[in-house]
Image: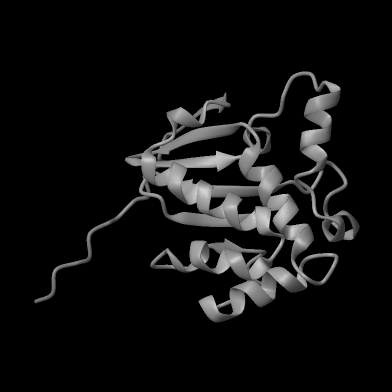
Amino acid sequence: MKKPAPNLKSVPVKEIIEGPFTDIGLLPSRVAAMREKILEASATFNIEQLRPAIERNEVMPLFGRAGERPRSFAKAIEFLRNHSYDGNGREILLVLEAVFTAPFARVKRGPHVIFIWPAFALIPPAEIDADQGEAMLRCIAFADLVRDGFARRPPYHRGEIGEDGTWHAFGVS
């Protein structure tokens, strides 16, 4: 006689958001190393230089929305190049640089910790001065401004790196 399957209920995971932080010395060494690889590639203005940071992971970072994201490491650079207004990937590299040089947030979800850039994607500032406004605008890709669904909130790009240094995502938040 078969035993009935246990009744598994989903337990909500408490999420703790801390930040914004500007001191990169607060980042774990693996997170800082991945961030640095991304910024080094961004500084070259050659999207191909991003490949080592992408392929450093066991799984590919999530780029774009569910229906349009690349399915393999081999197609990731082409995807990013095609989603760059200039067609060469330079715009995406500029957005990457803006995102990963902005203040960050530390998010704890159960036992997992993830670092998210820019912090304002999670924690909107109460007041925005001219410098903050400019930094926020740099985190938006030109093509995303014409997409539907952003009437209430700008389409900021956001980057996520796990505590172990795994680059989890980069895309519109």
Residue at position x 79%, y 65% in the image = 84
Is 152 placed above or below 59 here?
above
Residue at 67 percent of width and 44 percent of height: 99
Quadrant, the N terminus: bottom left
Instruction: Indicate the position of residue 85 as horizontal and vertical percent values.
Output: 85, 65
Q: Residue 22: x percent and y percent?
A: 58, 26
Kindly indicate the quadrant of the structure image that contains residue 122: top right
Q: Residue 40 vs residue 151: left or right?
A: left
- Nearer the observer, 91 or 75: 91
Question: Which residue is at the far front?
Answer: 44
Q: Is residue 4 above or below residue 165?
A: below
Display coloring: one colour
Identify which residue is drawn at 81% across, 44% down: 154
Taking depth in this image into account, of 88 and 139 the one nearest to the observer is 88
Left or right: 47 as drawn, with respect to 15: right
- Residue 56 image position (x, y, % from top left): 43, 64
The answer to whether residue 173 shows anywhere in this view is: no
Whether residue 136 can be seen here: yes
Between 41 and 87, the one lying in front of the other is: 41
Q: Give 40 or 165, whichever is nearer the viewer.
A: 40
Report x, y in % for residue 94: 74, 52
Counting every numbered tag in the picture gives 0
Residue beneath the point at 67% across and 47% down: 97
Q: Name, please, the residue furthest toward the right.
A: 146
Q: Quadrant of residue 118?
A: top right
